[in-house]
Amino acid sequence: MQRMKQNALAVYAWFERRLQLEGPVKDAVLHQVPRQTASWWYVFGSAAFTLLFLQIFTGVLLALVYVPAAGEAWTSLNVLNHQIPLGWFLRAMHGWGSNFMVAIVLIHMAQVFLFGAYKFPRELTWILGVFLLLMTLGMAFTGQVLRFDQDAYWGLGIGASIMSRVPFIGGGLVHLLLGGPIIAGSTLSRFFALHVFVIPGALLLFVFLHVWMVLKLGVNDWPMPGRVVRRTTYMEEYHHLSHTDGIPFVPGAFWKDLIFSGAILAAVAVCAVVFGPFGPGGRPDPSIIQTVPKPDFFFLWIYTILSYLPPQMETPFLLIVPLLAIAILLALPLIAAEGEKSWHRRPVAVLVVSTVAVCWGVLTQLGTSTPWSPHMSAWSGDPLPVNYIHKATPLVRQGAVVFQAKQCRNCHSIGGSGGERGPALDMVATRLTIDQMRFKVVTGGGNMPAYGKNLSPPEIEALVSFLETLHPANEPPAYDASKRTVEALMPANGTGPVNNSRADSGATP
Amino acid sequence: MSNMTYPAKPQPTDPGVDTATTPAETRLVSRRWMLFKAGIALNGFVGLVLAVPVLRYLLAPWRKDTSFNSWVSLGPLDMFPTGETRLAYYKNPSHNSWDGETDNVACYVRREGTNQFKVFAINCAHLGCPVRWFPQSQLFMCPCHGGVYYADGSRASGPPERGLFTYSWQIISGELQVDAGQMPTLSNTAKLVTISTRSGDSKCSG
């Protein structure tokens, strides 16, 4: 036993004599950090690091089977899902690992921001971190493209359409993005190169520098109200803090990182087993147009913004705001390198993070339900509730048929089903008079197309007759007050002005 | 910044006057530095020269719009009944054997008269999603952000800034041909078109 131990030590010594890693590793492992940084709040960076390696590991395993060619990629993904033993599990790990990585990186960023950790002397660590965030999002998007299905195909189309809005060089940029004039084989090849070589290479280099600086500059001290960062005194104060009230990084602070990383890996695995891999969805065949493309979870908020922006604001917004946001993030540590770190003394920082979080949550929620999209099959798939036409006249029933057949239902819901693009029409007669409804149907307006050319006059009459019945039994339909006044002034035997509206007849006393 | 307790950084030494060397060695060292600089200059020059083919290679897809296009047939004229809008397909003129199904492109053909056509791109003018034709209401609807177009391709409602993209067409020996080759986007088609919002249609002004 003793002899074996001696042999092992000799082997270690042989390697150490050549590698000479013991010194730097000991320095990194045993350096003093302030006691309070051994906190559960400080585990997100190391978890992101762990997830990066999970992604590299599972990515290499997937690349053993995946074929990065437009004609074969979709099939090879299905082979991974269904034929290779546990191929589905590795795809699921890679997909969920990606979602977890984006989430953890964002949480890490919010935490670093709220704890003022970007201030002197860690400005560059933050700046590299901003690039790491962008690269993580870049990996998420290019990864979505490699899952070469309908969503990937049309997602690329959206990317190309955004790119095409760049003035002057938009066309060239689209061709560069797609590797040619259309989304095709060259497009997938270049996204494969980006996802597998270019971005991961840069990511690893930046992560190395990011972690290097964390080790060299020390973990950010716990922000205390009143402990103000000054360039002139900070280094001394930090040194004092970490040496009078410090602990060695390992194991003092590191055990929490280890446990959290392990828990995150386990969570990814549980999600992978329970929810399975993402797609692939429909075949990437652009001639199949019965599709409702949607981006992956972390890009849903952009999808929502693109729907709600006024048309004339869209191009400037798309081209300027992302650059502005990145510039602000990069400039932040240079502008606010000194001062209070504690969130107790930085109400604006807290407000910014909570506002961004709430906006992001709302936009993502809207992106999940997409109330702005017409329901393409509502007109044929969602029958009209029977009670709406129970005692209806033939004209009203004809109107209900027009309502269904002309796809009104795709944008307007009735009885709780149908599109949400336009308002629900269950009580429309209480809001609009029959004349207003006729006008709206014929001329459209707002987000509604004009149906004047697409409906014959009898169809319009039938339709508005049906719409006029859409009011609660105890609430009369809307009426034109001025018209009633005119009628009251006229002789009662019907020789007054031509009344082509039946809206008033029910409501007139 | 000056009072930082960073580890003292060694002052850069002037290579020409290396204090550690005796005056006799100065000349030798300065020669080494000169050769070192020459080495950097040589590598910089070679790098620049090599960057030219690399850039040319990377920018290969950056070509004039017209260089991608050519006339492709959508099929015989009797495939398209007068007064109707039909989905038609073509294989993109520039394609590779490894494109799979991605070079199958769909478009909408509207026959307005015996020899009068309008050919619309499938891609919504907003963000390129595939629009769907509803013959009952005579509308194109986009599933992504709810853009809607009239039968003549003009914008009806929603986020698009303009009507549907159109292809140039011609009739050659009883077949309808379109000038196709690249994904229609605002950068390659928009400049030809007068943008109209409500009733107008998207006529080519060029």
Image: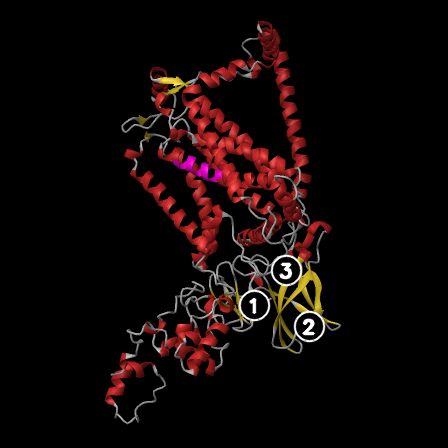
Rounded to the nearest whole Å, what is the CA distance between mark 3 and mark 1? 14 Å
Q: Are marks 3 and 2 in contact (CB under 8 Å)?
A: no
* Residue A111, position as x, y percentages in the image: 39, 34
Q: Residues within 10 Å of mark 3 (few under 14, many from 20)?
A: some
Question: Is B17 placed above or below A321 here?
Answer: above
* Residue B165, position as x, y percentages in the image: 58, 64
- Label 3, secondary structure: give it: loop
User: Residue at the spot x=28%, y=94% of the render?
Assistant: A493
Q: Are marks 3 and 1 in contact (CB under 8 Å)?
A: no
Q: Farthest residue in the right direction?
A: B173
Q: Are marks 2 and 1 on the same chain?
A: yes
Q: Residues within 10 Å of mark 2 (few under 14, many from 20)?
A: few
Rounded to the nearest whole Å, what is the CA distance between mark 3 and mark 2? 17 Å
Say which residue label 1 marks: B133
Question: From which residue to which does the magenta span run?
Answer: A100-110
Name the residue type under label 2: Met
Say which residue label 3 marks: A287
Rounded to the nearest whole Å, what is the CA distance between mark 2 and mark 1? 17 Å
Name the residue type under label 1: Trp
Q: Are marks 3 and 1 on the same chain?
A: no
